[in-house]
Amino acid sequence: MIRQIAKANAILLLQYAAAALVPLLLVPHIVRSIGVAVYGELAVALAWAGFGGLVTQYAFPLTGSQRLAAGADPAQVLVQAVATKALLLVAVLPPLALVGLLHAPAGAAGSGTWLVLLAVPAGAALNAAWFLQYHGRFLGVALTSIVGTCGALLLGGWGVGGAAPGDVLAAAAALSFGGLYVGAATLIAALRLAGVHRPTSGSPRVLQALREDWPLFASQLVSALYTVSGPIVVDQIAGAHAAGRYSAVERVISALAAACQLTYVAAWPRLAGCFAADRPAYSHLLKQVMATYVAGTTLIALAVWLGRDPLFAFLFGSAAAEVRPGALLAWGLAWLVAGIAGPALTGYLTLSGRKAQVMTLNLGVLATCALLGIPSVLAFGPAGWMAALVGSQLVVLAAAIYHWRRRDGPGERV
């Protein structure tokens, strides 16, 4: 089992190493070309589109694997997910159109905003990588992601060279392309793997999925209110320039976090299986995954902090001295190290049939982040929201310790 996870983790490392080129190479290139403020407008659009993508994904990356592990028919699970996500995409487009009408700026930045608002949720609705990964198709998903990343880099590298209207539109297209391509490609591959030729489903199955997965999805939506909404909050309080600074650093931190969480992503199908069949093996494997994450992120955080000056020059170019993102990066690295507690605890509560508790947890985190974040942004700028994210993780850590100590008690045995 460990060898299988290590193999899957190596493939995922290749996939995320390629995907990390977008925030590590493409985003800095876009920021330096079109300017921090214009990029800030696109970053706010990406945040709104991220909410749309979250809605269309619903909770299938977690609950889909759980249903497959429980022995459900793969074709039925996939068809149910496709039909439900199609309905959610139709439902989410009107609110996003309203966001575009109210917040899209004039000119090319406005057109780029509309492109992002439509393309990102569509890509999330199509994405079926979870189905392929459950069936061991990690390499196929990785290659698809690499192709999508190369397409985004080509669009950004060739199309963005300044701050002209065409450059801004090319930047929006580059930031949206990868998700849309990967979504379409993984859905086609998943339908072929499951032997589904006409992905249709009756409304009772769609409504069943919506009801069953609602507690977990609602908790994810609440979580997004403090993780995804950072550029939106910063933009409303401190302006597009501050939102651009926040997003540029946050994208780097998120890329590092995604890479460091590869072990957990690769182990998730095995964790789901072990939880049902061998609870001690689940606890042992979870401890190994978390220890690997904490050790890896601590070393990465130290290395990034020591090389912060070249990083700032690379991210912001000649504007680095004006931006002064030192505090923002420091809090972001702290958030990186603390990032495994949430997914690990959410996964445990999901597998143990207590999805409603995930909502309670995330509500506590959201309240903490809002209480700390809004006044912190007013006082310290974009670094204040990142600091609030770190402070809110104390709620997750306390809950994780509580459940871990009680894992063998009668209230924890499910």
Image: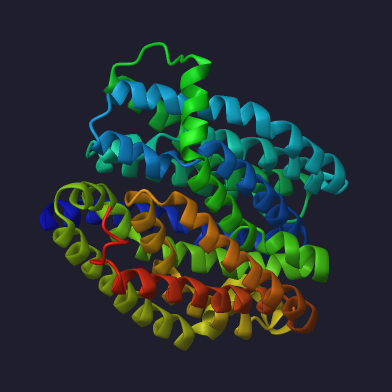
Residue 375 appears in the figure: yes
Q: How is the image coloured?
A: rainbow
Query: 327 and 171: which one is in front?
Result: 327
Residue that appears at 43% across and 16% down: 199
Query: 329 and 263: which one is in front?
Result: 263
What percent of the width, then of the height, locates residue 255? 46, 62
Q: Is residue 210 above or below residue 242?
A: above
What percent of the width, then of the height, locates residue 14? 30, 54
What percent of the width, then of the height, locates residue 364? 58, 67
Residue that appears at 81% across and 45% down: 110
Q: Is residue 156 above or below residue 259?
A: above
Residue 190 in the figure: left or right of residue 170: left
Residue 37 in the figure: left or right of residue 4: right
What percent of the width, then of the height, locates residue 264? 31, 59
Query: 172 and 302: which one is in front?
Result: 302
Q: Is residue 237 above or below residue 134?
A: below
Residue 35 appears in the figure: no
Q: Name the quadrant containing residue 89.
A: top right
